[in-house]
């Protein structure tokens, strides 16, 4: 390294510059004079010349310091006496101040103002140690200046001008010149610092993470939907896509920060895009059309570093911002099955035909009362005791009426005259003798009794009047309405109490008061089927209740579809219940009661599903946290960041000499996942990985892993998989074996096929037992019905899929309906019963399923490797088009059986990249029109920065020019419709780590 004092490049004769500067605008900051300056003309001339040369020395020294500080910027101070002079937070500016001091001090040695025998010299204190260097640093201040901060203002304090005559000091003067020089050292340092900050910003701030997210989303969704549609894509998001997205994002951040990006990086991005497209074809995108669509969707154009915006047309599949329709769907049928169980429906209808009745009584005394004292038998007798007895007897009818309470109506009334007959017996005693006498009397009462009723009962149907309640002819089903309630009420309240006379007598005897009871009227025999058919229509309306939600928000659990469906159904409840102001008949009230019971049951189930989804949200967050560095909160930030429009570039700043244009030059211009060494780029130190990546797919095969941890729990056995999962795996194995024979895969396929057959057998047994129990068919006929229905599917996997997707049950109902002449209601009841059939025995084992899936993937990879080795790209494409069964393997998180209907499948990828530039350089032009090529270059390459600060010939270490490095995280969620294939990486590796992870650079 060239020392300050040895470097004489770019120096200009001070005498010439002094003349120029005297006629230009100069900024001088005179401070104080230690001795009065002689006023001789020679002294003034010498001082003026020295002052002008000092100004030039400061300007020249500051300019040189700016160039050298930028070329070797100190980012981290060294842990040395000299390095500790620099503050950690302002290391670059402090190193620039030190360089400026030394450069200026070196140039001041050549200042020599002379007039006759008078000479003037300029100087700064020498630097001999760290303490001197700290003092020197404090003498210099630097800051950005000029239009847009493209220049640099510097002030050097207390430069000493010494006046000598004939070698004797006659005067000194201190000056603090301030200069503005057209160097962009500070501007470039600030820009590179901003660049590194943006590279390490999280998802909630502009930078690499946001831009990388914006590039990964279209790739993931395009490839995810291609896989869902049947394309042979094993990895939806692979590290090759992560690398491509990261480098495009890096160039985008460069352009936004510096106004332009590395041209070599742009060319490399174009080449990498093409290479990635070829790899996608070879590795399973099944043809150039699919690959081109994916690349098109990602909008990776050769010169573009702008994040792709979501397209609205010609897209191969929907995007995360697109809405999806979620309906109540199967919930309507599962709830229907519970509320229409004969015993449950019977209770609902019975409640509608049940009314409240009451016995209202009133008594009033007309005359008479208890007898007086019994007569004495004579003198000398003393009354020692008495006892009164009474009896009540209805002696005739009366004409009074008892009042009817509000809200009740009278069913029957009657009145009676009741006598209460008293006998009072007295006990008299005279000496040892005792005798008895009696007195009698009668009290007459008028008793009024009314049997009243009201239609409240226990029914969920609102209380409304029934216009034809007691008219048997008005029922739509030829039933009695509530016409038989009156005799039943009389039986319950009057006859059971002993009859009318006895009721009146008990009222007078105070053994009977107001009494309430319920009475259930007889229902028409056709009522149950009539209401069931009505509920079938309501079920269809409820099933079609839908809400629109954003696909991305569903996958990040920002929205809760069951909760939104509940709110939507609650809004429709009044219209769907169809409650009239007045019931036409009791049957209509029963119909309304059943409708409300059903609607409320659906609302309750949706509420339970909303709670379950909230529980799933917490479990998904747990899986993300345990398996990656991400979280649902961060995933939501990524979804928002995808939509954040980033600035394409910053405006070109204009400096004193015109536009200041920057140029970015990086090594390596494309941060590859491959290992490189200095043979490729000189800035590298040995072998390095410029970029490393970790890509974790949260819900992927093997089965029984993260997805089961979310939706399983108490509902699933830890060593079992759903029959549909096993069936799809079996189908994948068969399809692979059609193209490539392998003993290992065949053996594992046979084991799994045996388990699927056993599960199918258990399932069909449960089906014919259900037919036998819910129809008039015997066991033999029930077996024959199910056997005929299942004959449409020949292979075990086809039968299993039919049994799990409901098509087998539907066919059984059709066969049974035709053979047994079932009514519409009977068919519907049977269908719902068959769809509910499920037992643990219908679930194959996890080990057999995973073993077969793993063998399928191994065969597919081996065959593709052979194809590449034997015949190159074209044969590889043909093999990929055969699929080899891998596209049938399921993946993803169902949203969300078993407690809610399956309305979508989601999957999450959490991506982390770490990278480091071996050398990151930015240069800016700052020349005048006469010197347009002048540039300042700021370069960080990780090397030590040294400087000879004490002029001893040995350079001291100031610090290091740290490499530009970064770490960025983001998450991507893809949501596809509910089908067994799902979406996700199917190569068996949930986590893909690039070579060198997690150590990027050196």
Image (cartoon, helix red, strand yellow):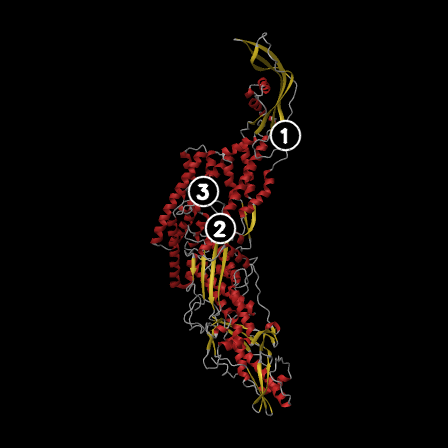
Give the residue displayed 42% in from the left and 34% down from the top. Answer: 781
Residue corresponding to mark 2: 618
Asked whether residue 229 is in view, the answer is no
Q: Secondary structure at mark 1?
A: loop
Q: Secondary structure at mark 3?
A: helix
Q: Residues within 10 Å of mark 3 (few under 14, many from 20)?
A: many
Check the image and name the residue furthest to the top.
378
Q: Residues within 10 Å of mark 2 (few under 14, many from 20)?
A: some
Residue corresponding to mark 1: 407
Pointers 1 and 2 in contact (C-beta within 8 Å): no
Res 398 → quadrant = top right
Q: Residues within 10 Å of mark 1 (few under 14, many from 20)?
A: few
Image height check: is 406 above or below 387?
A: below
Q: Is 381 situated left or right of 730 in this image?
A: right
Chain-order first, disc 2 or disc 3: 2
Q: Quadrant of the C terminus?
A: bottom left
Q: Is 398 situated left or right of 743 in this image?
A: right
Image height check: is 430 above or below 409?
A: above
Q: In this rendering, which labeled residue sits more in front, label 1 or label 3?
A: 1
Pointers 1 and 3 in contact (C-beta within 8 Å): no
Chain-order first, disc 1 or disc 2: 1
Q: Nearer the viewer, residue 3 or 637?
A: 3
Q: Position of residue 937 (x, y in %)?
A: 53, 75
Q: Position of residue 406 (x, y in %)?
A: 64, 29
Chain-order first, disc 1 or disc 3: 1
Mark 1 to mark 2 CA distance (whole Å): 51 Å
Asked whether residue 311 is in view, the answer is yes
Mark 1 to mark 3 CA distance (whole Å): 54 Å
Question: Mark number for residue 808?
Answer: 3
Q: Nearer the viewer, residue 891 or 713?
A: 713
Q: Nearer the viewer, residue 967 or 652?
A: 967
């Amino acid at each position: 390294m060239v020392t300050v004092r040895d470097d004489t490049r770019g120096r200009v004769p001070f005498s010439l510059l002094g003349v120029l500067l005297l006629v230009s605008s100069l900024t001088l900051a005179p401070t104080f004079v230690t001795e009065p300056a002689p006023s001789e003309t020679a002294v003034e001339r010498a001082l003026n010349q020295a002052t002008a040369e000092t100004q030039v020395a400061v300007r020249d020294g500051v300019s040189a310091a700016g160039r050298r500080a930028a070329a070797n910027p100190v980012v981290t101070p060294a842990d040395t006496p000299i390095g500790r002079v620099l503050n950690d937070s302002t290391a670059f500016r402090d190193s620039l101040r030190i360089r400026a001091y030394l450069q200026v001090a070196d140039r001041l040695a050549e200042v020599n103002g002379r007039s006759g025998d008078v000479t003037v010299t300029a100087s700064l204190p020498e630097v001999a140690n760290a303490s001197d260097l700290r003092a020197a640093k404090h003498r210099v201040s630097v800051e950005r200046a000029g239009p847009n901060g493209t220049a640099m203002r510097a002030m050097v304090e207390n430069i000493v001008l010494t006046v000598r005559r004939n070698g004797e000091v006659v005067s000194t003067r201190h000056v603090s010149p301030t200069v503005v020089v057209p160097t962009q050292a500070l501007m470039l340092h600030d820009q590179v610092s901003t660049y590194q900050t943006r590279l390490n910003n999280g998802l909630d701030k502009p930078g690499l993470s946001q831009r990388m997210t914006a590039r990964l989303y279209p790739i993931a969704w395009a490839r995810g939907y291609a896989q869902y549609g049947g394309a042979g894509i094993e990895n939806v998001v692979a590290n090759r896509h992560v690398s491509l997205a990261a480098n495009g994002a890096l160039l985008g951040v460069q352009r936004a920060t510096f106004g332009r990006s590395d041209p070599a990086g742009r060319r490399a991005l174009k080449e990498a895009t093409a290479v990635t497209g070829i790899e996608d074809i070879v590795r399973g995108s099944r043809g150039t059309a699919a690959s081109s669509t994916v690349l098109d969707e990602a909008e990776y154009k050769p010169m573009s570093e702008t994040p792709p915006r979501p397209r609205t047309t010609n897209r191969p599949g929907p995007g995360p911002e697109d809405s999806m329709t979620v309906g109540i769907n199967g919930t309507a049928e599962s709830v229907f099955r519970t509320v229409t169980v004969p015993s449950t429906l019977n209770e609902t209808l019975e409640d509608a035909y049940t009314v409240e009745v009451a016995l209202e009584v009133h008594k009033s005394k007309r005359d008479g009362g208890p007898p007086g004292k019994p007569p004495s038998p004579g003198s000398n007798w003393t009354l020692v005791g008495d006892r009164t007895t009474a009896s009540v007897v209805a002696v005739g009818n009366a004409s009074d009426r008892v009042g009817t309470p509000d809200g009740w109506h009278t069913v029957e009334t009657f009145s009676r005259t009741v006598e209460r007959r008293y006998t009072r017996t007295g006990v008299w005693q005279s000496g040892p003798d005792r005798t008895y006498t009696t007195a009698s009397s009668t009290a007459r009462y008028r008793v009024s009794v009314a049997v009243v009723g009201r239609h409240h009962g226990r029914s969920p149907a609102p209380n409304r009047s029934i216009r034809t309640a007691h008219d048997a002819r008005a029922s739509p089903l030829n039933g009695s309405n509530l016409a038989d309630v009156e005799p039943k009420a009389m039986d319950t309240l009057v006859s059971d109490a002993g009859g009318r006379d006895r009721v009146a007598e008990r009222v007078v005897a105070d053994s009977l008061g107001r009494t309430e009871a319920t009475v259930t009227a007889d229902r028409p025999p056709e009522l149950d089927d009539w209401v069931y058919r009505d509920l079938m229509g309501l079920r269809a309306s409820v099933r079609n209740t839908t809400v629109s939600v954003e696909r991305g928000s569903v996958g990040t659990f920002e929205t809760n579809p069951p909760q939104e469906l509940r709110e939507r159904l609650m809004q429709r409840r009044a219209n769907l219940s169809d409650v009239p102001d007045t019931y036409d008949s009791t049957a209509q009230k029963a119909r309304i009661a059943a409708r409300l019971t059903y609607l409320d049951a659906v609302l309750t189930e949706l509420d339970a599903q909303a709670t379950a989804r909230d529980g799933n949200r917490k479990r998904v967050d747990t899986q993300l946290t345990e398996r990656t560095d991400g979280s649902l909160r961060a995933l939501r930030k990524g979804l928002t960041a995808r939509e954040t429009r980033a600035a394409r570039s910053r405006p070109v700043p204009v400096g004193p000499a015109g536009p200041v244009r920057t140029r970015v030059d990086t090594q390596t211009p494309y941060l590859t996942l491959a290992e490189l060494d200095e043979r490729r780029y000189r800035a590298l130190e040995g072998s390095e990985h410029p970029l490393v990546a970790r890509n974790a797919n949260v819900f992927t095969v093997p089965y029984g892993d993260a997805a089961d941890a979310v939706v399983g729990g108490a509902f699933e056995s830890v060593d079992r998989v759903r029959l549909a999962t096993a069936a799809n795996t079996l189908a994948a194995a068969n399809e692979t074996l059609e193209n490539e024979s392998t003993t290992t895969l065949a053996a594992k396929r046979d084991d799994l096929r045996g388990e699927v057959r056993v599960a199918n057998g258990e399932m069909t047994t449960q089906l014919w037992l259900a037919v036998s129990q819910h129809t008039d068919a015997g066991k033999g006929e029930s077996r024959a019905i199910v056997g005929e229905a299942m004959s449409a599917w020949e292979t075990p996997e086809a039968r299993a899929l039919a049994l799990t997707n409901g098509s087998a049950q539907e066919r059984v109902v059709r066969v049974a309906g035709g053979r047994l002449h079932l009514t519409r209601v009977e068919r519907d009841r049977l269908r719902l019963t068959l769809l509910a059939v499920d037992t643990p025995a219908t679930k194959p084992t996890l080990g057999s399923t995973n073993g077969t899936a793993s063998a399928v993937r191994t065969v597919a990879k081996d065959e593709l490797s052979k194809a590449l080795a034997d015949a190159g790209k074209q044969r590889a494409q043909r093999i990929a088009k055969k699929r080899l069964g891998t596209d049938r393997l399921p993946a993803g998180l169902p949203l969300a059986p078993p407690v809610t209907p399956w309305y979508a499948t989601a999957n999450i990828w959490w991506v982390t990249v770490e990278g480091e530039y071996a050398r990151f350089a930015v240069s800016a032009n700052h020349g005048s029109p006469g010197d347009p090529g002048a540039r300042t270059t700021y370069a960080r390459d990780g090397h030590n920065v040294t400087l000879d600060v004490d002029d001893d010939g040995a350079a001291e270490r100031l610090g290091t020019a740290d490499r530009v490095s970064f770490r960025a995280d983001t998450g991507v969620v893809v949501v596809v419709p509910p089908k067994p294939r799902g979406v996700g990486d199917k190569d068996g590796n949930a986590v893909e780590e690039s070579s060198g992870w997690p150590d990027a650079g050196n």
